[in-house]
């Protein structure tokens, strides 16, 4: 168990930032779900009361996580990871279908979403593997094993279907990059995304011509170094082949709702009353907030329920309408401060396990924050990614709490042993 000395060494700036984000998040959930039908403040039929209950359980979770010896998380990381995988597999047999996705275990009127906890489990397993090999991940066999470790939970999540939760596993590329993964993997990922979007917008022929042109320019620019023509041809062929596969993936792997959302964001369709209704109303709500907002619980778009499910994935639109640009900026600053603090703590860790885990925490939180805000403001298609500590839900809040406070515990242990 953690000693009294250990308790005094927990990173209070991180915990205060967590408390601020959870508190502000609850205030916005309260506003977004406030109704005239409530029998009282502690009416459990109300969303804001249930979220307050989830927050209370989160405090108990924090106490439990911080009370356990830090070595437990490293020693049992593989077991935790296997349990997480089994919980995802179990959904195919025991899962409950909610809103078209079999992502939940039902317990009476409540549900538990295992994908929210699998992120912390994967972060622990990745940190354990990288620290065990006692080297960086430049060797291909280590790269392959880490990619499999990361891909397994994502592969189990995609068929639920829950592509948003599966997308988050891209975040693990950043801690691997910190540990020696070649920068070419980041470039490859960005280039693949650009090819995918470019093919949807301009078509296969124009993208293929662009690839050939770029390859030709790069080859002739490096001709004095006698570049390998075969390598350039191979890369160009692979890129063109990927471009030709985009339409098949888009039409046969994506569901219709995902295709519609991509088309709206890319400007190929205008559907402000159908599939694009949520995003359109969210943009209106945020834009109407101006500089200082309409005031807490005073948002007309929010009160009129113009943004469906505003207390979940679209909670940031409540911030924009009622708190305005300045309030939204405050929320962004708090998130950035938390991310910077986590990265600072990760760099001061005395062992590789804690450092890799810390970078994983920061990367997961960043991707959630970045994609959710982009989704709510219409920059990205709606993919069902919640805003950490803000969006309504016990599984999400507990998953992020576990993810963060395991790192707080690891950091306290390193601080004591320094």
Image (tube, rainbow, N blue to C red):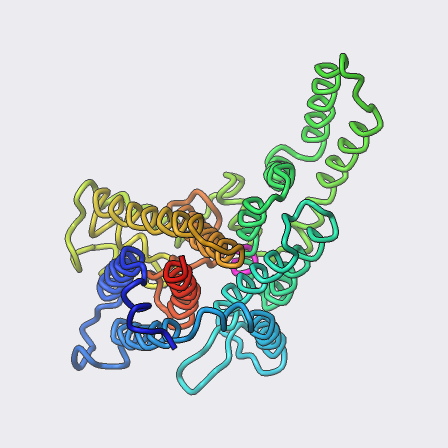
Q: Quadrant of residue 237?
A: top right
User: Where are the magenta residues, as a range?
Assistant: 164-168
Indicate yes or no whether the magenta region holds residue 167: yes
Say which of 412 and 293 sits in front.
412
Q: Main secondary structure of the magenta part?
A: helix
User: Farthest residue toward the front?
Assistant: 418
Q: Position of residue 140 (x, y in %)?
A: 73, 48
Say which of 69 and 115 sits in front.
69
Quarter that holds the C terminus: bottom left
User: Farthest residue toward the bottom?
Assistant: 108
* In this picture, residue 120 sits left or right of residue 332: right
Q: Is residue 138 visible?
A: yes
Indicate yes or no whether the magenta region holds residue 338: no
Residue at the spot 26% in from the left edge and 73% down from the top edge: 52
Q: Is residue 274 visible?
A: no
Q: Position of residue 20 (x, y in %)?
A: 24, 58
Residue at the spot 79% in from the left edge and 21% down from the top edge: 227
Quarter that holds the N terminus: bottom left
Q: Please tell me whether residue 313 is drawn above or below residue 199 in the rendered image.
A: below
User: Farthest residue toward the top?
Assistant: 224
* In this picture, residue 159 sits left or right of residue 8: right
- Tell how many labels: 0
* In this picture, residue 248 sits left or right of residue 315: right
Residue at the spot 61% in from the left edge and 35% down from the top edge: 198
Q: Position of residue 109 (x, y in %)?
A: 40, 84
Say which of 225 and 231 sits in front.
225
Q: Please tell me whether residue 193 is drawn above or below residue 273 in the rendered image.
A: above
């Amino acid at each position: 168990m953690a000693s009294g000395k250990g308790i005094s060494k927990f990173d209070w700036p991180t915990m205060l930032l967590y408390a601020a984000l959870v508190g502000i998040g609850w205030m916005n959930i309260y506003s977004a779900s406030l109704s005239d039908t409530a029998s009282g403040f502690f009416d459990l039929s109300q969303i804001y009361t249930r979220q307050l209950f989830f927050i209370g359980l989160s405090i108990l979770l924090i106490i439990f996580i911080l009370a356990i010896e830090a070595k437990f998380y490293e020693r049992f990381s593989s077991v935790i990871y296997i349990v997480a995988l089994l919980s995802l597999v179990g959904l195919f047999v025991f899962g409950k279908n909610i809103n078209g996705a079999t992502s939940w275990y039902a317990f009476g009127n409540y549900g538990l979403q295992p994908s929210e906890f699998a992120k912390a489990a994967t972060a622990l397993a990745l940190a354990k593997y990288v620290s065990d090999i006692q080297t960086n991940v430049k060797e291909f066999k280590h790269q392959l094993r880490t990619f499999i470790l990361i891909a397994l939970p994502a592969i189990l999540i995609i068929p639920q279907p829950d592509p948003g939760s599966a997308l988050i596993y891209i975040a693990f590329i950043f801690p691997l990059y910190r540990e020696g993964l070649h920068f070419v993997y980041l470039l490859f990922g960005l280039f693949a995304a650009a090819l995918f979007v470019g093919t949807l917008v301009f078509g296969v022929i124009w993208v293929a011509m662009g690839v050939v042109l770029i390859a030709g320019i790069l080859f002739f620019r490096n001709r004095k170094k006698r570049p390998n023509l075969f390598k350039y041809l191979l890369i160009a062929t692979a890129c063109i082949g990927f471009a030709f596969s985009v339409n098949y993936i888009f039409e046969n792997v994506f569901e219709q709702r995902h295709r519609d959302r991509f088309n709206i964001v890319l400007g190929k369709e205008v559907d402000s009353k159908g599939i694009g209704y949520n995003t359109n109303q969210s943009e209106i709500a945020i834009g109407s907030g101006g500089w200082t907002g309409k005031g807490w619980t005073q948002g007309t778009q929010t009160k009129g329920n113009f943004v469906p499910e505003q207390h979940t994935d679209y909670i940031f639109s409540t911030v924009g309408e009622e708190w305005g640009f300045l309030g939204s900026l405050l929320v962004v600053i708090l998130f950035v401060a938390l991310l910077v603090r986590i990265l600072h703590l990760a760099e001061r860790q005395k062992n590789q396990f804690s450092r890799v885990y810390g970078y994983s925490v920061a990367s997961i939180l960043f991707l959630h924050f970045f994609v959710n805000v982009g989704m709510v403001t219409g920059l990205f298609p709606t993919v069902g990614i919640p805003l950490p500590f803000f969006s309504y839900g016990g599984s999400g809040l507990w998953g992020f709490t576990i993810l963060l406070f395991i790192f707080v515990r690891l950091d306290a242990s390193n601080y004591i042993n320094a």
